[in-house]
Amino acid sequence: MSTLHSKAAQRFLETNKNARWHDDTFWVLRAKRDVMAHELDEWERLRDVACAIKRHTVTHLDRYLEQFVGNAERNGIHVHWAKDAEEFNQTVLSMLRKQGVKKMVKSKSMLTEECGMNPYLESHGIDVVETDLGERILQLMHKRPCHIVVPAVHITQEEVGHLFEEKLGSEKGNYDPTYLTYQARLSLRDEFMTAGAGMTGANFGVAETGDVVVCTNEGNADMSTSMPKLQIVAMGLEKIVPDYKSLAVFQRLLCRAATGQPTTSFTSHFRKARPGAEMHIILVDNGRTDIIGEPEHWETLKCIRCGSCMNTCPVYRRSGGYSYTYFIPGPIGINLGMLKDKVRYADNVSACTLCCSCDNVCPVKVNLSEQIYCWRQGLDSIGKADLVKKSMSLGMKYLFNHPQMYDTALKFAPITNHLPHVLMYNKLNGWGYGHEMPVFKKQPFHEIARNILKDEDKKGNI
Amino acid sequence: MSTKEEILSRYRRNMKVKGQYDMPDLDALNGIEYADAVSQFIAMSRTVGGEVVTLEPGADVNEVIRKAYPEAKVFASNVPGIAIAQRNPDTVESAQELNGTDVGIVQGDVGVAENGCIWVPQTMKERAVCFISEYLVILLSRNNIVSNMHQAYCRIRMTDYGYGCFISGPSKTADIAQALVMGAQAARGVTVILTD
């Protein structure tokens, strides 16, 4: 009855004394998002338009990619294409080697996580320095992100304090977030000053102008690219938007949906290399051209990685990012994992109550829960259906198809209300595992309805 | 076949989405409008952690900056009229030389009332001045404040340097225990000076 996710979620709740804090913290982000949404009369209209722009763009992607690349090249940017993670990693490495770069600073990029770039480059002798504070903390701890926007939310300030004492030589016992942030600032400043290359991801690529747009609160994407002679942008194919008018829509939605701020502190537009430097963009496929061929799942390509589906998800909030087996957790991660490898990541589809809250907050209206439902329907065909659930479903099917047996079963069902706890809550009863069983009424609904109809019939009302 | 052709032909082969999805009419989309966009801009700039001061007629902008940052010693700018700047981002040998700047002073083009963003196009050789300085001063004409991002994106212009940034308040992070801290990697504070 248990998936890897549900087992991990149980461990999270049993062993993590911050589980409640985790839940509350993400609910605060959701509430802040709501305040932002309610301040704008046009919020729902913006979501509709954002969805329409993305649907249009991802179904005309070849055209927009050619336009984007044409403009970027005219602006003197070197554009490369990578069909998969391996080609991407090799392209980055050869670029760094050509310029003799030993150290690269970088801002947050889910694409480089997806491609496993850091371990690859490190194994080839390149020092890769994450410069987003949360990512830097995780890098020093050798941990992976638990959320795509607030990656280190699960690490306590005491843990950060101990880490910085050891790695950065900060004061013993000083766990003040302001002090610790300043220590990281000083240390990262040295890295920016001495790095040979700076890398960013891309929130958007504007076809009409060739701009790469990166949104950060820390300014680390700008710090990473304002000093080195080499700038590299890692960009998924689906990041293209047609023009500035479209960009305005997404700029307004992204941060409001993500953290409940009216904007990120920095919305940086990179159109050319800075004087005396080189700028390269690597466009990465890594499965995206397969996703467009999935009739029920192509709309995941609309995702702008704001993380709002995680913040609102009751399962994510109560199970944490590490309970999922794919590196992106939450509703969007469940779907992206299945698109990556549906046998390997099938355990995550149980991490959904089908409450549909994610669909209602998604700024680009990806039908996340609907897609999860579809994946569940297909579990049996890939040999991943849970045997207990499968036999229970077959039993229910038989019962529902035999009304007399159903009536009899319902008549005796209230007996279970009085059965000893141990008989109802054990591993044989999948429905009693992890949740409370319903209390059966003495008179089932259809019997009540039948009696009413009989009475009304007698009165001549029917 | 190059990787580019391989990827594009794979996309074309797999693109079987049924239905025609056209671009929506973005001109029909009206963003929020403020009766007093300047007041809203000032309020929002403070919400995002910035300061706003008004340059009174006849006042010296250099004095206003000194008053805002009385302890600052090293100023960097290439903006005409900023006499207090010892460093010039146009003439430094490398961007790294700007490290240790207490206050950088730059010119903003368009202010946005809904979120406190200011469009700062690169008008200097080393744009690092916008980020490496401990504190940032952005000069902005009150006549160039619009209500929302739709209007802003219709107005912004890139310079030949090919870089520009919407800056809204100081660099910030909440990555440690979700506590908001100003001054992650870039400027720790921002003062907007509104001019005529």
Image (cartoon, grey):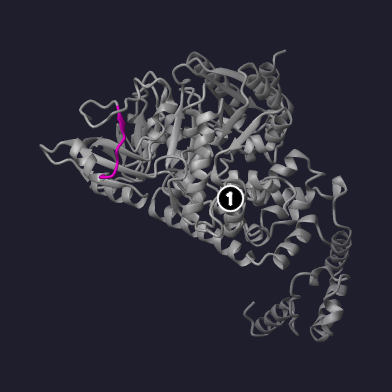
Q: Is residue A11 above or below residue A443?
A: above
Q: Nearer the viewer, residue B27 or A66?
A: A66
Q: Which residue is mark 1?
A: A164
Chain ID at mark 1: A
Bounds of the magenta span? B70-77
Q: Position of residue A200 (x, y in %)?
A: 55, 32
Q: Is residue A18 above or below residue A309?
A: below
Q: Secondary structure at mark 1?
A: helix
Task: Please report the residue visible at 65 percent of the width from the left and 67 percent of the height from the top.
Answer: A17
Task: Look at label 1 and name its amino acid.
Answer: Phe
A24 in the magenta segment: no
- In the rendered image, the quadrant that contains the N terminus of chain A is bottom right
Left or right: A103 with respect to A184? Answer: right
Main SS class of the magenta portion in the image: loop
Task: Please report the residue visible at 75 percent of the width from the left and 85 percent of the height from the top.
Answer: A442
Q: Position of residue B114 (x, y in %)?
A: 34, 46
Task: Please report the residue visible at 70 percent of the width from the left and 14 percent of the height from the top.
Answer: B2
Q: How many marks?
A: 1
Q: Is residue B68 above or below residue B91?
A: below
Looking at the image, which residue sits at the far left?
A: B58
Left or right: B113 with respect to A161? Answer: left
Q: Position of residue B131 (x, y in %)?
A: 41, 35
B72 in the magenta segment: yes
Q: Nearer the viewer, residue B101 or A107?
A: B101
Q: Residues within 10 Å of mark 1 (few under 14, many from 20)?
A: many
Q: Nearer the viewer, residue A222 or A29?
A: A222
Can you see residue B92? yes
Q: Nearer the viewer, residue A67 or A294?
A: A67
Q: Position of residue A20 (x, y in %)?
A: 61, 67
